Image (cartoon, rainbow, N blue to C red):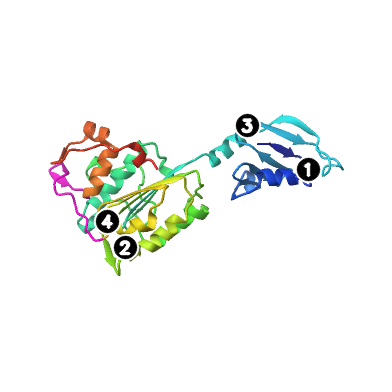
C-alpha cells in the first residue's frame, strides 16, 4: 500500500492511486483544530485532507510517508522524498481504524415493577462485559426510564452511571441508527465492518400474528422492525442473547453465518424467572431471569465462585469465550 503526502492545495492523488486505494465503502471523520482535518477511511487506505495547508494519504501499517514537492509540473511529474509522519496523528488514525468490540444492553422494564432482576441482570451483564475487557464507552445501556436503580446489594452497584438511554423504541432506533451512520450528538460511533457486536435484551415479550415482539417502556417492538435496524449495522461478527418470552421468534430475522444467537424460549414459549437459582444478601433473595442466570454465570464463573454464593440445583457449565465475545 503506497503512502503519499501532497504539500500543495492543487496537488491530489493520481488516477492510478485513486483507482488502487480510494475505492469501496468509506468512513469520514473530522478532527484537529476546529475539525479542519478530514479523514476518509477506505478499505485499503486512509485519505486525509488538511484544510490548513496540505492533503495526505496515509497507511496505518507504516510510519513513513512520501512527500510530493509542488511546482508547475505537479500534475505531470511526481518528485518524491521520504519523510516521517506525525506519530500522534498515526496513533489517532490507527485507533479509529482498529477493530472495536461494542455491546448493546436493552432492558425495557424497571426493578420497581416488582421484578428486581430487571436491574440485577442488567448491571450484572454490564460488569461482566467490563471484566471481559469491553470499554465502558463502548457499552450502550438502555434501561427502564433511563435512570439507574439504587440497590443495597454492592454487587449490583457501580461507581459510575450504567444507564445511557431509556429503553424506548425511540432510543432503540436512535442507537441502532447511530451505530450504522454515526451520531456524534449522542456519543454513538459509526461501526465498521471489522468491529464486533454483543447484544443482550430483557423484558416481557409477546407474539401476535405469527411474529414475536419485545416490550419496551413505550410500546412493543416487532422482531422484523428490530432486526431491520440491527442488521443494517456493519460488523465482522456478533453475538445476541435474548431473555424475553417468545424470543425464539427473533431468530429467523437475525440468523446468518456471522451471528451467534441464543434465546430463553422458542417462538411459542414463555420465559421465566429462575426458581432454583438465586442468591441471598442481607436476608433478601435476589432472583434472575433463568436464561440470564446461566449465560452470565458461564461468562463470569471465576468471579462468582470467588466473591458470591448462589443457591442452585443445577450444575453450571462454563461457556466458550467465543460465544461471549462476538
Per the image, the residue denoted by label 1 is 8
Q: Is residue 306 above or below residue 71?
A: above
Q: Nearer the viewer, residue 278 or 123?
A: 278
Image side of residue 8 versus residue 171, left or right:
right
Q: Are marks 2 and 4 in contact (CB under 8 Å)?
A: no
Mark 2 secondary-structure assignment: strand
Give the number of the mark in front: 3 or 1: 3
Compute the Cα span from label 4 to label 1. 59 Å
How crowded pointer 4 is (Cα within 10 Å; few <14, some 14-19, many 20+) is rated as many
Range of residues picked out in magenta:
268-289
Q: Which label is found at residue 62? A: 3
Q: In which image quadrant can residue 2 be found?
A: top right
Measure the alpha-carbon separation of dots 3 and 1.
23 Å
Dot 2: within a 10 Å radius of its alpha carbon, few (fewer than 14), some, or many (20 or more) residues? many
Per the model, the C-alpha gap separating discs 4 and 3 is 48 Å
Question: Residue 117: horizontal and vertical position, in percent?
Answer: 23, 50
User: Is most of the magenta stretch helix, strand or loop?
Assistant: loop
Tell me whether circle 3 and circle 1 mark residues in contact (CB < 8 Å). Answer: no
What whole-number distance in Å separates the C-alpha atoms at marks 3 and 2? 48 Å
Question: Mark 2 highlights which residue?
Answer: 213
Position of 220 relative to 156 (above/below):
below
Q: Residue at x 17, y 36 (%)?
A: 309
Amino acid at each position: 500500500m503506497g503512502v503519499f503526502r501532497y504539500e500543495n492545495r492543487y496537488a491530489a492523488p493520481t488516477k492510478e492511486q485513486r483507482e488502487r486505494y480510494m475505492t469501496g465503502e468509506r468512513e469520514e471523520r473530522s478532527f484537529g483544530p476546529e475539525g479542519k482535518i478530514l479523514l476518509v477511511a477506505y478499505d485499503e487506505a486512509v485519505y486525509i485532507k488538511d484544510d490548513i495547508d496540505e492533503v495526505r494519504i496515509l497507511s496505518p501499517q507504516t510510519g513513513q510517508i512520501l512527500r510530493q514537492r509542488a511546482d508547475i509540473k505537479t500534475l505531470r511529474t511526481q518528485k518524491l522524498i521520504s519523510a516521517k509522519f506525525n506519530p500522534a496523528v498515526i496513533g489517532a488514525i490507527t485507533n479509529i481504524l482498529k477493530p472495536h468490540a461494542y455491546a448493546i444492553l436493552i432492558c425495557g422494564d424497571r426493578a420497581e415493577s416488582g421484578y428486581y432482576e430487571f436491574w440485577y441482570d442488567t448491571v450484572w451483564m454490564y460488569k461482566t462485559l467490563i471484566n471481559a475487557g469491553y470499554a465502558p464507552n463502548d457499552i450502550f445501556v438502555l434501561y427502564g426510564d433511563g435512570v439507574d436503580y439504587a440497590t443495597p446489594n454492592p454487587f449490583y452497584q457501580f461507581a459510575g452511571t450504567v444507564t445511557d438511554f431509556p429503553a424506548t423504541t425511540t432510543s432503540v432506533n436512535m442507537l441502532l441508527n447511530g451505530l450504522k451512520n454515526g451520531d456524534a450528538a449522542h456519543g454513538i460511533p459509526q461501526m465498521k465492518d471489522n468491529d464486533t457486536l454483543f447484544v443482550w435484551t430483557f423484558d416481557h415479550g409477546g407474539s401476535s400474528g405469527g411474529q414475536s415482539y419485545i416490550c419496551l417502556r413505550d410500546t412493543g417492538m416487532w422482531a422484523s422492525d428490530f432486526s431491520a435496524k440491527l442488521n443494517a449495522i456493519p460488523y465482522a461478527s456478533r453475538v445476541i442473547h435474548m431473555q424475553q418470552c417468545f424470543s425464539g421468534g427473533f431468530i429467523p430475522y437475525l440468523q446468518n453465518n456471522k451471528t451467534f444467537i441464543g434465546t430463553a424460549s422458542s417462538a411459542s414459549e414463555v420465559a421465566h424467572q429462575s426458581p432454583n437459582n438465586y442468591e441471598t444478601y442481607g436476608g433478601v433473595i435476589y432472583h434472575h431471569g433463568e436464561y440470564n442466570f446461566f449465560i452470565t454465570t458461564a461468562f463470569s464463573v471465576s468471579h462468582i465462585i470467588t466473591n458470591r454464593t448462589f443457591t442452585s440445583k443445577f450444575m453450571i457449565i462454563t461457556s466458550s469465550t467465543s460465544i461471549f465475545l462476538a
